[in-house]
Amino acid sequence: MLQYQPPPLDALFQALADPARRAMVERLTAGPASVSQLAAPLPMSLTAAAQHLAVLEAAGLVTSAKVGRVRTCTLDTAALSQAEQWINARRMAVGAQLDRLGDYLAATKPDDEP
Amino acid sequence: MLQYQPPPLDALFQALADPARRAMVERLTAGPASVSQLAAPLPMSLTAAAQHLAVLEAAGLVTSAKVGRVRTCTLDTAALSQAEQWINARRMAVGAQLDRLGDYLAATKPDDEP
DNA sequence: CTGATACTGAAGCATTTCCTTCAGTATTGT
DNA sequence: ACAATACTGAAGGAAATGCTTCAGTATCAG
């Protein structure tokens, strides 16, 4: 059986690094939309928007299906939280490091310098 | 007075989109490090690593100060959570949309189809 | 059937990214 | 004083990115 493999973080963050693509993600939080609908507010050609959409899809951030002549796109929140988790884990690691500093300070001079 | 302006999300996500730069961020969660220390584990020249560092600094993810001939770099978690918050806000928005669907379903057919 | 709609594909072009090498400056250790 | 260390700057090149336009294929509406 084929294993699902999470999109690499590279593609995920790269996809989020463009304002046009973030705008699309933002629009999709309100529900599924067609390619045209996603492209409409953007100051670029439909083709360009479709290319951005391809990037989002490659990153796993959106899935899409074509019915008739319209392709409907949906946001995949799993990919979104995948990125969030990476960031959060690093922030936690920093906290842990500060905690260790606290422990160190508490352990080495518990009763110096009154 | 000069206002602090948060680094644009563009630069933030772009900075995180590279594995070498994420490795640096990861290393910095364990505490401050010099340019050489950050570059050492990476399969590239010191110059290349320094360039990556410049990207991280431009994105606001790291701050650095030079003492003598060594520049010491520190992770700035504020920038990190800035990116996290954007993602989280979108995920929340999706949840809200689903909630509204639930409300809609509850409101429109509270007693149809038993 | 005809025309409008909704993409889709291919090509081309300017800019940016990621890396290289080579050279230079400022410290520090002996 | 001399050499090693730790960057720093400049230049260049291969590849990726973000557009564009032009042309094509389905699909739907009248």
Image (cartoon, coloured by chain):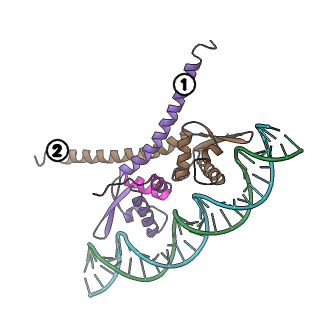
Chain colours: A purple, B brown, C cyan, D green
State which quadrant residue A84 falls in: top left
Residue bearing mark 1: A102
Residue at left offset 75%, top offset 39%: B68
Labelled pair 1, 2 in contact (Cβ < 8 Å): no
- Identify residue type, mark 2: Pro
- Can residue A40 be seen here? no
Label 1 element class: helix
Q: CA distance from mark 1 to mark 2?
A: 56 Å
- Which residues lie in the magenta part? A1-28
- Respond whether the residues carrying marks 1 and 2 are from the same subunit: no
Residue name at image x 38 percent, y 56 percent: A60
As displayed, is residue B63 above or below residue A65? Answer: above
Q: Nearer the viewer, residue A1 or A90?
A: A1
Left or right: B94, with B34 as reference point: left
- C9 w.r.t. B29: above or below: below
Closest to the observer, B6 or C17: C17
Give residue C22's position: percent from left, percent from top: 74, 61
Taking the magenta stretch, the answer to whether it contains residue A17 is yes
Q: Quick one: SS at disc 2?
A: loop
Q: Find disc 2 in the rendering and name its residue.
A: B110
Foreground residue among B47 and A91: B47
Question: Which amino acid type corresponds to the residue marked 1 in the rendered image?
Answer: Gly
Where residue B7 appears, as percent x and y from the top left, is: 57, 47
The chain containing the residue under callout 2 comes to B
In the rendered image, residue B3, in percent from the top left (x then y), is placed at: 63, 41
The residue drawn where x is 51% and y is 28% is A99
- Image quarter in which the N terminus of chain B is found: top right
